[in-house]
Amino acid sequence: MKAELEALMANASKRAEPATRPEPAPVVQERRLEPSAPPAARADPAPEQAAERASMILQALAANQTAQQSLNRARRKLDEDLFAA
């Protein structure tokens, strides 16, 4: 029985396919894209639009701060109520 197993193992190693190397990855060439519009056409929007956007951002920040202050007041009140009990 042992001889049969050894023979099978020897035959299996002979039948095994030789190890193949993985193919190297293809080389990717860097391409630079040409701009589709001249730089003047891609310029920033008008200063009025930028000011409007900045104003909207400031309003959102102020609203967020107000909401955060309200939550902090509510937490303090809950803490006071819990310690008072």
Image (cartoon, grey):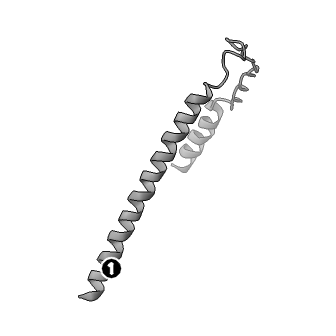
- How many other residues sit within 10 Å of disc 1, few (<14), some (14-19) or many (≥20)? few
Q: Is residue 75 left or right of residue 60?
A: left
- Comparing 8 with 54, the one in front is 54
**Is residue 8 depicted above or below 67 in this figure?**
above
Give the residue at mark 1: 79
Q: From this view, report whether residue 28 is shown above or below residue 67.
A: above
Q: Quadrant of residue 23?
A: top right
The residue at 59%/45% (across/down) is: 6
Amino acid type shown at disc 1: Asp
| Residue 81 image point, x, y percent | 26, 81
Residue at 41% in and 61% down? 68
Residue at the image position 61 percent from the left and 35 percent from the top? 11
Return the residue nearer the eye: 54 or 21.
54
User: Is residue 56 placed above or below 18 in the rendered structure?
Assistant: below
- Quadrant for residue 72, please give it: bottom left
The answer to whether residue 15 is left or right of residue 29 is left
Instruction: Name the outermost residue toward the front.
Output: 48
Q: Quadrant of the C terminus?
A: bottom left
The quarter of the picture where residue 18 lies is top right
* Residue 78 versus residue 51 in the image, above or below: below
Residue 10: % across, % down: 63, 39
Return the x and y of residue 49 as percentages of the image width and height. 55, 29
Residue in front for this viewpoint, 85 or 69: 69
Image position, residue 82 (x, y; %): 27, 83
Element type at mark 1: helix
The image shows a total of numbered marks equal to 1
